[in-house]
Amino acid sequence: MSGGRPAPGRIRVLLLIGAGVLATLLLGTAIVNVAANLRRRKPKNWYLRAKLQGISLASSLYFKDFGQHPPSKNGTELARLLASEIKRGDPPRIHGPYVDFGKETPEKAALDPWGTPLLYERSDDGLRFTLGSAGPDRKFGTDDDTVIRDDGLFLKKGKCEKPDPRSFD
């Protein structure tokens, strides 16, 4: 057949090729979108981990001076305490500040990248603590929480709760 309609078998082949090209384009677009989302999310997680490590280290310096971790009720109070000078002893000796948040206020430094206040829990004896973020879902106790212990270890799928000293052995 010259100049007329293509054969039915040839139409099927052309339709299959067209469908394959379209599916490849759609799949490629989906992969690029997922990768872009992951790229946007990772910097927040890296920033959060660095922030938690910095506050944890500052708390360890406080521990070195006073023999226990800061007696704060929440992340904001903890950040304020660690960023200030503390006078104690007889004669009074100045301790701290243990952390410098730069241009951030302690109140801002005590927020995770999603705007949720950090949760700080200290054991009754003051020897252990956990510090955590609720993560992107902004709910504590879910799988996306990021929690660091006073020994610098991050907990997998951890909940920020009052630490049990036996759990560190």
Image (cartoon, rainbow, N blue to C red):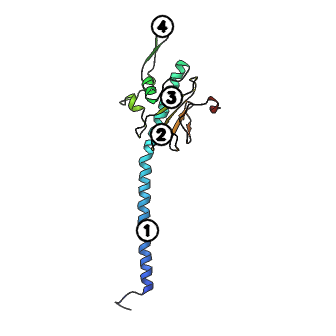
Q: Which residue is mark 4?
A: 91
How many other residues sit within 10 Å of disc 1, few (<14), some (14-19) or many (≥20)?
Answer: few
Asked if the residues shown at circle 1 and circle 3 are in contact, with their CB atoms under 8 angstroms apart, the answer is: no
Residue plotted at (50% across, 41% down): 145
Q: Looking at the rendering, which quadrant does residue 34 occupy? A: bottom left
Q: Earlier in the sequence, mark 4 or mark 2?
A: 4
Q: Could you tell me how far apart the alpha carbons at marks 2 and 3 are, in whole angstroms?
A: 20 Å
Q: Earlier in the sequence, mark 4 or mark 1?
A: 1
Q: Which residue is mark 3?
A: 57
Q: Which residue is mark 1?
A: 23
Asked if the residues shown at circle 2 and circle 1 are in contact, with their CB atoms under 8 angstroms apart, the answer is: no
Q: Which residue is mark 2?
A: 134
Q: Could you tell me how far apart the alpha carbons at marks 4 and 1 are, in whole angstroms?
A: 77 Å
Q: Could you tell me how far apart the alpha carbons at marks 3 and 4 are, in whole angstroms?
A: 27 Å
Residue plotted at (39% across, 29% down): 107
Q: Could you tell me how far apart the alpha carbons at marks 2 and 1 are, in whole angstroms?
A: 38 Å
Q: Earlier in the sequence, mark 3 or mark 4?
A: 3
Residue plotted at (53% across, 35% down): 160
How many other residues sit within 10 Å of disc 3, few (<14), some (14-19) or many (≥20)?
Answer: some
Locate the C terminus by quadrant. Answer: top right
Residue ranking furthest to the top? 91
Q: Nearer the viewer, residue 71 or 35?
A: 71
Q: Earlier in the sequence, mark 1 or mark 3?
A: 1
Q: Earlier in the sequence, mark 2 or mark 3?
A: 3
- Residue 82 place in picture, x, y as percent: 45, 24
